[in-house]
Image: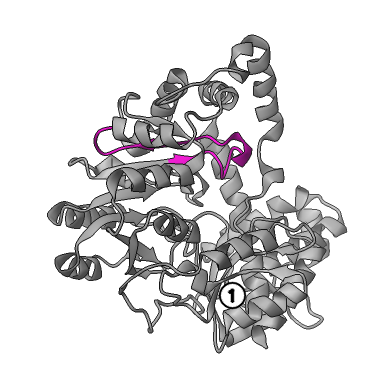
């Protein structure tokens, strides 16, 4: 897109301080001449800069530079409570999923990624090759750990940020959520206590409920992650069996923990004999070019069970995830066999070829850049409409915004939005004990266009009222 070079130029210069907020930007004619583009392309570039929050219209005198507001960042909830509880709102989670899968609904609710941005042609090419050269792949059971060649290629790929050297402890699963469920089955017994970030992905809450476990929400900063002091204070007095943590581009807050914070959390787990299940589903979608290291990378004491998948950047339909246990892999195999015997053989063969021949880091990073642009646009529009009533997270990756709206009853607003064919996820669904009444999560994955713009305006009006 021709306008993107113009956008990148101004964003870079504004962020470096070479163009100051309030400074008048060149006229459309000058932009057209300087970048050798049409006037319509120059208009589109300034429109994008305005949507991103880097430009504003100055009456009839053109555009001036601005810097996206950072004083509206959502703070930790002042009403946060950490208490042991059983999860009661599973039916609401299922209802949300059913509602937001309707194609006539504005898709700000359920966490579906931008499927049309995935490398679908490339995947289909490798699927065709697999069917041609390995006809047995569509009819074979790959019991136990899964396809050996895939596990070898996988370990070679993840080693730089996981520090894993052997494929022998890697088990292929049907996505990341199955990996998490198997880990809970293997590490816990009914009634055990599981510590979780707060807020956390409601699929994790569903899994905890399914296994008859209890949840303990941990104080979690929207920018830095789990509060180590608060975690240790609870670890001293509560018999925590497992901690589930998403240290990179966490859903819904979007933070990425520093390496030092990860080491602190690992130290507490070691001290109080707490197992850590790591959910690393969004690691490839970080906005920074360098892929963050995981808890697993720093684990020297067999504390971490690592779970991830290709669903968020290669294709959810592949249903390929994996789990790397902290201890005996065979008890994980037994759990897998009790569920579905084996994962899809055809896609295991296919993904092994993809891993060997394609640059998956680039695929993830390109998708992360696309999501970052969307998040900026969505943030700017909502901020314009809701003003000081709104506080937003500053995600480091993925495609979610976590928002606090002053005076909001998110459950009532959800019902109003539903009548207007708009979806979002109420904040209470991300809490074991139904906290975050005036919060919500917004999915920013889908391509921004005039239709999406109108839907966001309608959503903002519902939230504001």
- Residue at x 52%, y 34% (from the top left corner): 320
Give x and y (percent) for residue 436: 47, 77
Give x and y (percent) for residue 434: 45, 75
| Left or right: 295, with 400 as reference point | left
The answer to whether residue 87 is seen in the rendering is yes
Q: Is residue 212 magenta?
A: no
Q: Which residues are magenta?
A: 308-329
Q: Quadrant of residue 443?
A: bottom right
Question: Which of these two is toward me, 275 or 351?
Answer: 275
Question: Which of these two is toward me, 384 or 270?
Answer: 270
**Above or below — where is 302 with respect to 263?**
above
Q: Mark 1 Cα within 10 Å, few/some/many (few <14, many 20+)?
A: some
Query: Which element type, helix, strand or loop, lies under badge 1?
Result: loop
For disc 1, the marked residue is 21
| Left or right: 147, with 244 as reference point | right
The answer to whether residue 53 is seen in the rendering is no
- Residue at x 72%, y 30% (from the top left corner): 121
**Above or below — where is 344 with respect to 74?**
above
Give x and y (percent) for residue 132: 68, 12
| Left or right: 389, with 274 as reference point | right
**Above or below — where is 243 with respect to 311?**
below
Q: Is residue 315 magenta?
A: yes
Question: Which of these two is toward me, 121 or 408?
Answer: 408
Where does the C terminus fall, quadrant-wise? Answer: bottom right
| Left or right: 197, with 344 as reference point | left
Give x and y (percent) for residue 432: 41, 69
- Residue at x 72%, y 44% (from the top left corner): 116
**Above or below — where is 359 with respect to 425?**
above
What is the number of callouts on the image? 1
Q: Quadrant of residue 336?
A: top left
């Amino acid at each position: 897109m021709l306008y993107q070079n113009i956008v990148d130029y101004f964003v870079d210069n504004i962020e470096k301080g070479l163009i100051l907020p309030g400074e008048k930007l060149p006229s459309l004619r000058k932009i057209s001449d300087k970048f050798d583009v049409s006037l319509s392309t120059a208009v589109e570039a300034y429109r994008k800069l305005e949507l991103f929050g880097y430009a504003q219209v100055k009456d009839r005198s053109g555009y001036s530079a601005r810097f996206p507001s950072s004083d509206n960042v959502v703070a930790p909830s002042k009403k946060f409570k950490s208490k042991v509880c059983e999860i009661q709102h599973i039916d609401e989670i299922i209802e949300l999923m059913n509602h937001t899968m309707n194609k006539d609904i504005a898709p700000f609710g359920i966490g579906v990624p931008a499927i049309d941005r995935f490398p679908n042609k490339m995947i289909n090419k490798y699927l065709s090759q697999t069917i041609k050269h390995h006809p047995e792949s569509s009819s074979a059971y790959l019991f136990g750990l899964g396809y050996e060649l895939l596990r070898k290629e996988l370990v070679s790929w993840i080693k730089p940020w996981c520090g894993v050297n052997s494929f022998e402890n890697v088990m292929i699963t049907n996505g990341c959520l199955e990996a998490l469920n198997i880990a809970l089955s293997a590490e816990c017994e009914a009634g055990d206590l599981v510590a979780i970030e707060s807020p956390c992905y409601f699929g994790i809450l569903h899994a905890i409920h399914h296994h008859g476990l209890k949840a303990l929400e941990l104080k979690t900063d929207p920018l830095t992650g789990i509060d180590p002091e608060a975690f240790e204070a609870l670890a001293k007095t509560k018999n925590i069996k497992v901690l589930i943590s998403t240290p990179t581009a966490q859903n819904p807050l979007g933070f990425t923990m520093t390496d030092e914070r990860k080491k602190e959390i690992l130290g507490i787990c070691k001290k109080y004999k707490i197992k850590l299940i790591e959910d690393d589903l969004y690691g490839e979608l970080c906005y920074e070019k360098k892929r963050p290291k995981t808890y697993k990378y720093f684990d020297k004491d067999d504390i971490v069970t690592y779970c991830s998948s290709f669903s968020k950047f290669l294709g959810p339909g592949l249903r390929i995830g994996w789990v790397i246990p902290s201890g005996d892999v065979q008890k994980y195999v037994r759990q897998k066999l009790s569920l579905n015997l084996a994962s899809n053989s055809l896609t295991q063969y296919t993904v092994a070829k993809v891993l060997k021949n394609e640059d998956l880091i680039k695929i993830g990073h390109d998708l992360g850049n696309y999501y970052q642009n969307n998040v900026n646009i969505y943030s700017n529009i909502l901020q314009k409409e809701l003003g000081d009533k709104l506080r937003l997270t500053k995600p480091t990756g993925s495609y979610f915004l976590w928002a606090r709206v002053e005076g909001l009853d998110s459950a009532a607003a959800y019902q109003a939005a539903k009548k207007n064919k708009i979806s979002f996820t109420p904040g209470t669904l991300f809490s074991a004990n139904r906290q975050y009444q005036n919060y919500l999560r917004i999915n920013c994955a889908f391509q921004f266009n005039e239709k999406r713009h109108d839907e966001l305006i309608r959503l903002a009006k519902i939230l504001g009222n």
